[in-house]
Image (tube, rainbow, N blue to C red):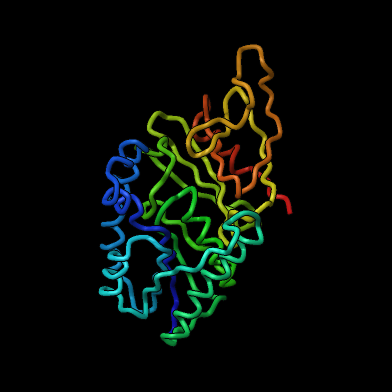
Amino acid sequence: MKINHIIFLIHPGIYEMLNEKDPESIRSGNYGLCLEREREIRQRWLDESASLNAGTLLLQLYGSVPLNEIFKGKLGEANVCYVRAEVPSGGFTGDALQREYHRRLTECIRSHMERFGLAMDAETITSEIWGQSFEGCAPGYASAFAENLQLKAAPRMRFEMTGYDSCFLYGAKRWESARLNGTDIEVWLFECYDGTAAAIFQARLHAQWLDKRPIRLQLNPSRLLVCNKRGHTVWPLKPFKKGDDENPCAYQLTTSDSYWVRSVNMNFEDFRKVVTSAAVAG
């Protein structure tokens, strides 16, 4: 059977599984919003899976086994693969071990396709990304699979089908994406509930956590900052104060950082110009 479309479903149902095992950990870890979002997108996964055609292969990386069985009931056993692999001894310390783990996971996919007589054309096949989390595992593993499967068309990120870890995305008013010229790197922009903005850079055809291509921006420290998904500021190193230099200065990150660029005092249109003008070296 010819497969013409792939859905990368990454770590679905992890907060529901945690809630069933240890409800107190949801409260103490402040994961309530994550659980709420997960329940919302789970219904979207189920609704959309009802209309998928026979040429779609759903690749579920770990997560809820009962959910995987539901997908098999809807799509058929051949069209659903529960992707798993033994973690290399030494864990994920270092790029080489991460690459080996990605290779093992991809081998699980290839074995499933061989078992059920599935074929695909890496030149033309399309794909999309669902699952947990929008800023972390979903793009991280999907891009690794795209690289290892040698896909030519970049997977489509479906934000509405993902959970997020960054609480400042809750209640976002709008979002959009743009491809950086000549690359597979996308920048995703959000207008947050309070009128501030946030942007993150993600690789699509190169394994994101191993992607060290420099992304260069010019940032005004009086109007912008850089933070991780927990909201901790990583730039500027000291809080901006009146009298400090307000001239834009060079800042460099990589997709493997998974850092957010955040606006402090800048409208969305000007913010868009800053992040979409980023230059990728290498």
Position above or below: 205 against 202? below
User: Seen in the image, is 21 located left or right of residue 139?
Assistant: left
Residue located at (32% from left, 68% from top): 68
Position above or below: 18 against 169? below
Question: Which of the two residues, 278 or 54, is positioned nearer the viewer here?
Answer: 54
- Name, please, the residue furthest toward the top: 243
Question: Which of the two residues, 137 or 146, is positioned nearer the viewer here?
Answer: 137
User: Seen in the image, is 73 located left or right of residue 83?
Assistant: left
Report whether residue 64 is seen. yes
Report whether residue 151 is seen. no
Residue 244 sits in quarter: top right
Image coordinates for residue 205, horizontal then vertical, percent:
58, 62
Quadrant position of the C terminus in the picture: bottom right
Residue located at (36% from left, 52% from top): 160
Position above or below: 159 against 53? above
User: Seen in the image, is 254 located left or right of residue 82?
Assistant: right
Image coordinates for residue 247, horizontal then vertical, percent:
69, 24
Image coordinates for residue 158, horizontal then vertical, percent:
41, 56
Quadrant position of the N terminus in the picture: bottom left
Residue 208 sits in quarter: bottom right
User: Seen in the image, is 149 located left or right of residue 162?
Assistant: right
Residue located at (63% from left, 42% from top): 277
Residue located at (44% from left, 84% from top): 118
Image coordinates for residue 162, horizontal then vertical, percent:
39, 53
